[in-house]
Amino acid sequence: MNETTRLLRDLVALPSVNPMGRDLTGPDFLEARVTGYLEDFFRGLGVRWERQTVAPKRDNILAWYEPPDAKRTLVLEVHQDTVPTDGMTIDPFGARVEDGRLYGRGACDVKGGMAAMLTAFARIVREKPAGAARVVMACTVDEEFTFLGVQRLAKTDLRGESQGPLEAVVAEPTGLDVVHAHKGAVRWDLLTTGRSCHSSRPELGVNAIYHMAALLPHVERFADELRAGRVDPLLGPATLSVGRIEGGVSVNTVPDRCRVEIDRRLLPGEDGDAAAGDLLTYLRQHVGDRVAFSFGDPWLSAPALDPAGSEELVARLLRAAEPVAGPRRVMAVPYGTDAGPLSRTGVPCVVFGPGDIARAHTCDEWVPLDEVAAAAEILYRLACMD
């Protein structure tokens, strides 16, 4: 078993499940076990490393390769967390290898990419190739829910004393193609309130669910108008959807509250707060004071990845990839990644890694081992380029 596969097997066998806002605890949840593994890995390489505490039991971990004559800095960024294991049909942490694939939660999203980056980073440290970039390996937390880790990373001085250009590759499953643009996201709650009473006398209460039902057709119309009226030539339309609703305490009680969660996908140049404000203005215009409602503050806001400024990095990554995996595509995708918040600081970013995004979060998640090995070779070549 080669080093890359061994790393991937170890990483998948270590649960790092993001609770995704649920009140869940236990050894399978949060990233601490993976962070500890990474600390031992970097310590074994003899490089400078640092933990950044983001939340209780949730630390980013960074490591540096710092040759004295480096002309640029390359950040290799990858998240440590995975989505939950609900509904999986395989052992989520079994890390089973079969027919050239490794199975398990996070194998595709994104521990395959992490193993590739760690392999490339370790090789650079050990071989010290002439002309290599200064490399920052950054492993962050909470990408799957609220992007807390990369928001902390974005406040870090990644350039240090280096005067050359700074750029970043963010690991996600792209099938070894290069993603140079993607949508962002902002999520918030829409709330209605009422007055509870016993359901045998509903006329004595005010039903918050009925109020929400009156609002939702207007939300749907706004989403249709948004999709038709705001379109990016690469990424397509801005979108809005309602993904979750809850309200009431029991079937025999008139509910005094109702809440829906709204997901708004952002195009380059859009601001999350302004996007939420657009819906607020629309509802006030079309509903007025007939229904009392309110918005919660956004609990996630991540900007889109704008391709402007990443052209040189894209070209060099394509050159690094072609001898290993043949000509690759440059793509725009509708989902969001850590590249959005990181690029907002002015760092040119691309998204790259092994695996197919369609296999992420699935009941039998897997990643092809040949792509993981190829990604490691491509990233090593990228770091060695002038």
Image (cartoon, helix red, strand yellow):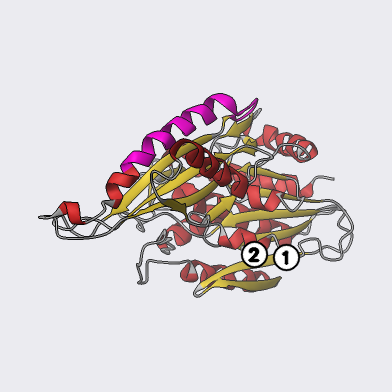
Q: Where is residue 289 in the image (x, y as percent from the top left)?
A: 43, 45
Residue 225 in view: yes
Please give the residue where the numbered disc 1 appears in the rendered image: 156
Image quarter hosting the C terminus: top right
State which quadrant residue 148 falls in: bottom right
State which quadrant residue 92 falls in: bottom left
- Within the magenta stretch, is there residue 47? no
Are the residues at dot 2 and dot 1 in contact (C-beta closer than 8 Å)?
A: yes
Residue that appears at 38% across and 40% down: 215
Q: Where is residue 359 in the image (x, y as percent from the top left)?
A: 42, 40
Crowding near the residue tagged with mark 1, few <14, some 14–19, many ≥20 C-alpha atoms within 10 Å? few
Residue that appears at 87% across and 64% down: 68
Q: Give the range drawn in magenta.
A: 213-236
Crowding near the residue tagged with mark 2, few <14, some 14–19, many ≥20 C-alpha atoms within 10 Å? some
**Residue 36 to residue 280: above or below:** below
Residue 2 in view: no
Q: What residue type is labelled 1?
A: Thr
Q: Please, what secondary structure does the residue beneath circle 2 have? A: helix
Please give the residue where the numbered disc 2 appears in the rendered image: 152
Q: Where is residue 247 in the image (x, y as percent from the top left)?
A: 29, 54
Q: Main secondary structure of the magenta part?
A: helix
- Within the magenta stretch, is there residue 219? yes
Residue that appears at 33% across and 48% down: 245
State which quadrant residue 367 falls in: top left
Query: Disc 2 and disc 1: Cα gap in Å?
Result: 7 Å
Residue that appears at 16% across and 52% down: 202
Q: What residue type is labelled 2?
A: Arg
95 relative to 251 in the view: left or right: right
